[in-house]
């Protein structure tokens, strides 16, 4: 019994957050020195934080999935599908709340389908979600007739802008929603029995089963949560774009996975940090925005993003080699 408790407790040092935090501060200082006139300033900072919302929300769900030992490549397609469904629902005369509810409901179904396929077919999550990535993208294009859908933003437009009458909020409501989601996820993962089950499952699924953990149920649950958060991110994306775009968020899954790994998550499962994931998402945004401010061409930025992803995967492998228990 004592051994089980040791293996299901929070298995990574909280100091892992220090790495991404230090990198974030260094990157910010670097671009602030290279372009102080445009990069520095509260307006640019709030803009960068706002631009991180979609990636951060999806990455929170991806953190839970990766800690459990899985992966979800369909999140980018699901974000795009949500924007299309919300836009189409508003076009049909539904209000902002009803349209959002439809988008979230579809996202839950997509997450449920991913989870059920993973546990029922016993196919690796990479293959299952690679297939659902294509299915959801095709569905989004079909619903939108392969074009953008213009719709009244209604109340959703207030999510990603600051109301001048509420300047005391400092950040748009979408940012505070992200903080609330992150706080809830951190509590669930680090301070509940459910979170310990997720960590134990990702660390060693066979041992988790022997300890009485319902691995099948936990697997489906984390994919459903990831679906819900991808749907929520889709609503935030619609608020920003004000259109339903079936071609939106291509490659988002790679950026999200990189944010999780930079923040201390492991592709092999059992490790992850919600705070670290948020720092990783901010780091990617700071780098992209900073490159734009100093005049780095877009094609160079894409190369840099690829390098960051490769380095992040390398760091994950290095951490696993240095952990004798993995």
Image (spheres, rainbow, N blue to C red):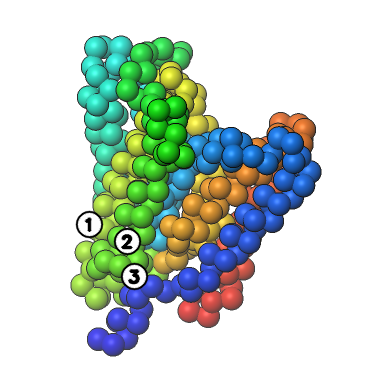
Q: CA distance from mark 2 to mark 3?
A: 16 Å
- The residue carrying pointer 2 sits among few (fewer than 14), some (14 to 19) or many (20 or more) residues within 10 Å by Cα, namely few
The residue sitting at 47% across, 23% down in the picture is 241
Q: Which residue is mark 2?
A: 187
User: Is 76 placed above or below 225 here?
Assistant: above
Q: Nearer the viewer, residue 275 or 40?
A: 40
The residue sitting at 43% across, 57% down in the picture is 274
Q: Sequence order check: which comes first, mark 2 or mark 3?
A: 2
The residue sitting at 61% across, 36% down in the picture is 44
Q: CA distance from mark 3 to mark 1?
A: 14 Å
- Quadrant where the N terminus sits is bottom left
Q: Which residue is mark 1?
A: 217
User: Is 178 placed above or below 13 here?
Assistant: above
Badge 3 marks a residue whose secondary structure is helix
Q: How many marks do you count on the picture? A: 3
Badge 1 marks a residue whose secondary structure is helix
């Amino acid at each position: 019994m004592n051994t089980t408790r040791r293996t299901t407790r929070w298995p990574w040092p909280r100091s892992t957050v220090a790495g991404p935090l230090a990198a974030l501060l260094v990157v910010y200082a670097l671009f602030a020195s290279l372009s102080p006139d445009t990069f520095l300033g509260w307006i640019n900072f709030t803009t960068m934080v706002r631009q991180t919302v979609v990636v951060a929300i999806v990455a929170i769900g991806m953190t839970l999935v990766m800690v459990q030992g899985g992966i979800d490549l369909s999140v980018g397609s699901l974000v795009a599908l949500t924007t299309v469904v919300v836009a189409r629902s508003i076009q049909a005369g539904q209000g902002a709340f009803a349209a959002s509810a439809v988008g979230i409901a579809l996202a839950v179904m997509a997450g449920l389908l991913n989870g059920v396929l993973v546990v029922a077919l016993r196919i690796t999550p990479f293959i299952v979600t690679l297939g659902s990535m294509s299915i959801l993208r095709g569905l989004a294009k079909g619903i939108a007739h392969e074009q953008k859908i213009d719709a009244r933003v209604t109340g959703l437009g207030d999510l990603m802008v600051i109301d001048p009458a509420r300047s005391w909020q400092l950040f748009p409501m979408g940012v505070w929603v992200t903080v609330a989601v992150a706080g809830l996820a951190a509590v669930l993962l680090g301070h509940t029995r459910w979170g310990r089950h997720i960590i134990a499952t990702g660390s060693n699924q066979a041992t988790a089963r022997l300890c009485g953990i319902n691995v099948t149920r936990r697997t489906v649950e984390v994919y459903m949560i990831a679906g819900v958060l991808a749907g929520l991110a889709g609503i935030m994306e619609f608020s920003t774009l004000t259109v339903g775009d079936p071609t939106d968020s291509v490659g988002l899954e790679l950026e999200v996975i990189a944010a999780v790994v930079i923040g201390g998550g492991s592709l092999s499962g059992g490790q992850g940090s919600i705070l670290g994931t948020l720092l990783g998402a901010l780091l990617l945004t700071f780098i992209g925005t900073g490159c734009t401010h100093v005049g780095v061409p877009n094609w160079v930025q894409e190369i840099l993003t690829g390098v960051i992803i490769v380095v992040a995967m390398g760091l994950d492998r290095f951490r696993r080699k240095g952990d004798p228990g993995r």
